[in-house]
Amino acid sequence: MAGTDDAGLQSAGVGEPTPARGVSNTANAGDTAGEGDNSGAARTPTAADASVASISTAASTPAAHAPSTPSGLSAVSDAIAALTVTDATREATVAQLNADEESSSLLDDGKHTLPFITRLYGGLVMVLGVCAIPLIIYELTYSIRQILDGKVTIDALALPFILSCVEVVVLIADAACMAVFGIQLLRSRRRHAARWAYALMPLTLAHGMLSLALEGFGTNLLGPFIQMTILVALSVTLDPALLQERQLQWHLKRMDDREAYDKAVQEDMLGRDQSGKGYISLDYFNIFWLFVVGCVVGLIIETIYHFVLVHEYQDRAGLLWGPFSPIYGCGAVILTVCLNRLWRKNAVLIFFASAVIGGAFEFFVSWFMEAAFGITAWDYTGQWLSIGGRTSGKYMVFWGLLGLAWIKFVLPYLLRLINRIPWKIRYSLTAVCTVLMLVDIVMTLMALDCWYSRVSGVPQNAPVTQFFAQHFDDAYMQHRFQTMTIDPSKSGRMA
């Protein structure tokens, strides 16, 4: 009888050798399923785990005791049944994943055409791109002939001429990419269209910035803004990889995020880079709040520094509303992104990297403000290692010290501070604050543009310019931005 029961157990797959393989395979399957979870969340025990434990217990029981414990057979049977259900569920899940992957590849093969409105937009984009290239070349050739014939006089070293040449190159590249992008939309090549949309985004951004520098803040920016909005929307909806990712992870994302959040809190790794390559996780939540804190802390430091140096309080804010200095916020984000993987490196390396990055960023901001609005916010002419008055060795050293202190000392405490925002409101609060910050930035740019127009003697006839002239006149702007002076002759705008 004992031999019969032992043989029955072995034939059922619960003998000593077989359960060991079954447990190993089940564990491996669980590990494989968990490899896709980059959040590092702890795996919740499932029915399969309980079943494996039951089989292990049954397998570890000597065969001689099997007749005396007939309930053990029923427990083993239940465990096998549970494993069968789990395996069937796993097979169904794998089949669904394969079906989703196949449908994603079919979408990219052009067998599933895009909506008519999308293909119509693709046709218009293709026509505009194809027609824009010869028109730009014709205008360029005509301008060159005018210059050679002496009908137009230019200064080849003038900033407006240099920016105009750069804009022509950007427009030609943009038109060529738009033509290819339109063809991919017409052919319903989703993956290729998404890639060309990604390529067009930086070109559209460059076009908008050049247009802002040459023509100011007005309807000239409407085209790049609409194009960027459409590109972002299409890149999100076209890319099959993004579609598949949303289909597979949408229902589990919130649960996985919460489990990862709880696990990170327990391990004191909240907001940290779980891969270990960098210090901080470069997600939007962390980046946005680092920007906000950088704006505020940078403003406080600069205000105190100026007060100690000249014994005078001066408003150093950079936006219309709030205690924000966006140059320090952007600087904090840039230093964090660039130095994130250097947080374990030697302090000397971090110092020099911060000095170079901060000096280059300060130079670019000074140049852009002058080219776009004729604004001079600081002038370091005559100082040690001054580069065009836009940055200097002294302030590059300051940037180096700030970057070193930021990465080595401030960031760990700051990360704990911003991650004290409760889980239930962290994303909604971030979204609301993002909208408010964008409104503040856009209103500041429009106010600066209208200030420039008034100083330049441009009539303020439009309702928008009259609104800013009434609520943000020259006296208000000069009081708010006490470090800024406007000289239209320094700007790169076309007359």
Image (cartoon, rainbow, N blue to C red):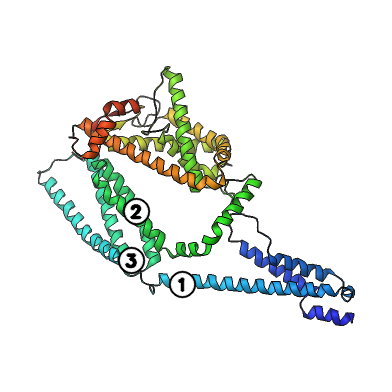
Percent across and percent down for residue 188 are 35, 69
Amino acid under disc 2: Thr
For the N terminus, the quadrant is bottom right
Q: Earlier in the sequence, mark 3 or mark 1?
A: 1
Q: Is residue 424 left or right of residue 177?
A: right
Find disc 2 in the rendering and name its residue: 229
Numbered disc 2: secondary structure: helix
Marks 3 and 2 sit apart, C-alpha to C-alpha, by: 17 Å
Residue at figure coordinates x 41%, y 18% from the top left:
312
Decide: few, some or many residues near mark 1? Use Cα within 10 Å; few <14, some 14-19, many ≥20.
Answer: some
- Distance between mark 3 and mark 1 Cα atoms: 18 Å
Q: Quadrant of residue 174?
A: bottom left
Lateral position of residue 450 relative to residue 385, left or right? left
Which amino acid, by three-letter code, is at mark 3? Leu
Provide residue 338's location: percent of width, then percent of height: 48, 43
Tell which circle, 2 or 1, labels the residue nearer the N-terminal end: 1
Number of the label disc, if any, that sits on residue 185: 3
- Depth check, mark 3 against mark 2: the one in front is 2
x, y percent for residue 484: 32, 28
Rendered residue at 13%/45% (across/down): 147
Q: Which amino acid does the dot numbered 1 rest on?
A: Ser
Residue annotated with mark 1: 103
**Crowd rating for badge 2 (residues with CA inside 10 Å; few <14, some 14–19, many 20+):** few
